[in-house]
Amino acid sequence: MSSLEEFAEIVKRDEPLAPYTWLKLGGPAQYFIEPRNVDELIHVVQVCCEHQIPVRILGGGSNLVVRDEGVSGAVLRLSHPSFAEVRIEGHRVTAGGGALLSHVISETVREGLSGLENLAGIPGTIGGALHGNAGGRFGEISQYVRSVTVLTVSGEKLVRSEDELSFEYRQSNLDELLILEAEFELQSDVPEEILQRLRKIWITKKSSQPLSSQTAGCIFKNPRGQRAGQLIEQAGLKGTRIGGAEINDRHANFIVTHEGASSSDVVRLMDLVRSKVADQFGVHLEPEVKIW
């Protein structure tokens, strides 16, 4: 029976996860693994399955809070360039699950393809964006996807066609272990006009969100017909601070961290927000960030 020892070149023991997350917080991973190609990735996943080692996937680390004690099992990160390739043929764009969404947007805009520029300013990877149906007031990534290649927890590679995919607000039925690549269909447009739209969206976001601060993106999903940030603000929580974590005074659905902050500060502040909003408005906020 194989073991993770045969992957010594790509496995790190007790690797701190904080440097890989946007919040720069959190404890270590028992095993931190960065495969160099798809075959090696599949082999690693199969070994973890054989040995019943839990596997988590670390994407861009943007919408993630890693607890201070860290995580047991294996954390896989698709950081190798082989997982971030972008191929464009006509209106079809194929992007690796490890590709940064911002990079794919840049490539499509350069080729005069319109659609993904509506997602400007959203952090993370293609895999993470699809899993959580990333989007905002200008559109969602699900509008453009045509097929997704996934890897199961047992290491099986599958292609999910458009009619097998289901997307809702900030969620999808892509619940396999990870997304290897996805195919999108976009529309041709004048590059200058696409670029102008992209800049306009970016300026709008920059004026209302703390993009230059240490954050994890929006903390809570918007309840149906309401805005989480507005509810948090109406509850009088802007500027509220626990330890080194603080509700941003520009956009209340963002938590920013300061020197000395811990993940427990962030989690405690999230709990406080949910409690206050539930008490005052009877609305139960659902986290948009993942907590490991």
Image: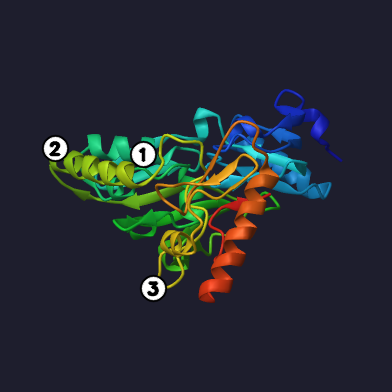
Q: Comparing marks 2 and 3, which lies closer to the viewer?
A: 3
Q: Mark 2–mark 3 contact, CB under 8 Å? A: no
Residue at the image position 41 percent from the left and 50 percent from the top = 251
The three-letter code of the residue at mark 1 reads Val
Q: Position of residue 18 (x, y in %)?
A: 65, 33
Under tag 1, what secondary structure? helix
Q: CA gap, disc 3 to disc 1?
A: 31 Å
Residue at the image position 41 percent from the left and 62 percent from the top = 230
Residue at the image position 71 percent from the left and 47 percent from the top = 55
* Residue 91 visible, this angle: yes
The three-letter code of the residue at mark 3 reads Gly
Q: Earlier in the sequence, mark 2 or mark 1?
A: 1
Q: CA gap, disc 2 to disc 1?
A: 17 Å
Categorize mark 2 by other alpha carbons within 10 Å: few (<14), some (14-19), many (20+): few
Q: Is residue 261 left or right of residue 224?
A: right
Q: Which residue is mark 3?
A: 225
Q: Comparing marks 2 and 1, which lies closer to the viewer?
A: 2
Q: Earlier in the sequence, mark 2 or mark 3?
A: 2
Under tag 2, what secondary structure? helix
Q: Which residue is mark 2?
A: 192
- Residue reaching furthest to the bottom: 282
Q: Position of residue 39 (x, y in %)?
A: 62, 37
- Asked which colour scheme the image uses, the reply is rainbow
Q: Is residue 255 above or below residue 84?
A: below
